[in-house]
Amino acid sequence: MPIPSDDALHAALARVNDPEIKKPITELGMLEAVDVTDDGQVQVTVLLTVPGCPLKDTITRDVTAAVSEVEHVTGVDVRLGVMTEEQRGALRDQLRGGQAEREIPFARPDSLTTVYAVASGKGGVGKSSVTVNLAVALAEEGLRVGVVDADIYGFSVPRMMGITQAPTQVDDMILPPVAEPSGVKVISIGMFVPGNQPVVWRGPMLHRAMQQFLADVYWGDLDVLLLDLPPGTGDIAITVAQLLPSSELLVVTTPQQAAAEVAERAGAIALQTHQRLAGVIENMSWLELPDGSRSELFGSGGGQAVADSLSRSIGAQVPLLGQVPIDVALREGGDHGTPVVAAGNVDGADDTPAATALRGVARQLARRGRGLAGRKLGITPTARASS
Ligand SMILES: Nc1ncnc2c1ncn2[C@@H]1O[C@H](COP(=O)(O)OP(=O)(O)OP(=O)(O)O)[C@@H](O)[C@H]1O
Ligand SMILES: [Mg+2]
């Protein structure tokens, strides 16, 4: 009695696609064994990617149909197994084209991107305004800049940067919208929730969202990544410290002493998470009056006080990077989606008072660049040889 040939059986099985991945099971390492008895009975063992795969009936049916058509087959018996962790890993690698799985590029030890997390102890002090303006100013300094709106509950970055387009998805990769003309790449949870709905997420989901923003978004090569954090010292701040241990904090405060104390607490988080403190930015420092005098609406000295106090507690100099005055143009820029430091004004000649101050902060950050000064190096200093 003639029996079905191996070649014919494999050709038939190569036409069976995994219903989810849409590729032949023979290419995915899912075909474990094909046994043929003398009377033409064929037993096919298929490995499912996960146990209890909801599509196992589909696979069984498709394999049965394909094999039944082969000449001399008298019966088909499909057995299902499950891939080992190793086999699954190999499949994942194969699908990702050899790329490491969901790696956060900025967390690699050889990453050249400086990551700043913009934080504050309390809300409404101007974190988002500072973030978007620094992003644009840094881009105008010639750096490649990305912004993550990490304020999941109060996302505001897309509006402030005038971004209305949604991210494009290519397989499991998200292409971030680009703000023009600055070329700053921006991603925000606001781009994924329809119609400004409030987002109510718990810690683990926040962690996952951040992980995705950092790993699945195609950022390309960035010089600087800015993260606009929600106010306070909550889950997101801790998540950021975990996912990006080399990120540095930029603390925003107002001149008010009460606000300064809160900002200090935000900065003190850096001590626990071992993040570096890049510096303090005081916002709403004063209002310039038409006669050129300054009205200190919210008090004075808060920014310097926070910088001094943080310097003392971490035992290293934390600079006050700038004082940003109250400036109607800054608020309007945010409302209209055109950051006040932006465009048509690259030389800064026509800058408003707030834009001048923010550009000054950006220059200092750009100068810090990627120097190794103050960076945590993976080496332990040894005692100096005495000469
Ligand atoms: N220097 C400034 N001059 C004038 N208006 C300002 C200034 N800084 C911020 N604002 C305005 O204050 C409001 C709050 O600013 P922003 O949203 O940047 O603060 P935030 O710290 O990000 O707030 P939240 O904690 O809600 O995220 C905005 O309307 C913004 O336009
Ligand atoms: Mg904000």
Image (cartoon, helix red, strand yellow):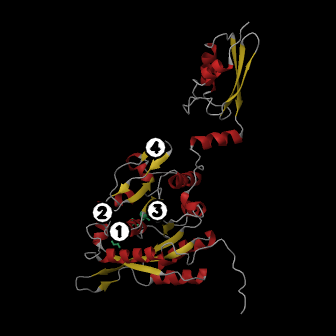
Other-residue count near label 1 (Cα within 10 Å), few / some / many at <14 / 14–19 / ≥20:
many
Q: Which mark is residue 338?
A: 2
Q: Amino acid at mark 4?
A: Val
Amino acid of disc 3: Leu
Quadrant in the picture for residue 28? top right
- Toward which corner of the image does residue 354 lie, by quadrant? bottom left
Report the amino acid beneath label 1. Answer: Glu
Q: Position of residue 126 (x, y in %)?
A: 40, 69
Which residue lies under the disc numbered 4? 170
Residue 255 appears in view: no
Kindly report the distance in space between the C-alpha atoms of the residues bearing marks 1 and 4. Answer: 29 Å
Q: Nearer the viewer, residue 256 or 372?
A: 372
Residue wearing tag 1: 140
Q: Residues within 10 Å of mark 3 (few under 14, many from 20)?
A: some
Q: Earlier in the sequence, mark 1 or mark 4?
A: 1
What residue is disc 3 on?
A: 222
Could you tell me how far apart the alpha carbons at marks 1 and 3 are, in whole angstroms?
A: 14 Å
Label 4, residues with CA under 10 Å away: few <14, some 14-19, many ≥20: few
Specify the quadrant of the image occupied by residue 56: top right
Above or below, 221 against 205 in this view is below
Q: Secondary structure at mark 3?
A: loop
Residue 89 on image: x %, y % = 66, 43
Q: Nearer the viewer, mark 4 or mark 2?
A: 4
Residue 281 visible in the snapshot = yes
Q: Would residue 61 appear left or right of 328 to someone viewing this image? A: right
Give the number of the mark in front: 3 or 2. Answer: 3
Q: Earlier in the sequence, mark 3 or mark 2?
A: 3
Name the residue type under label 2: Thr
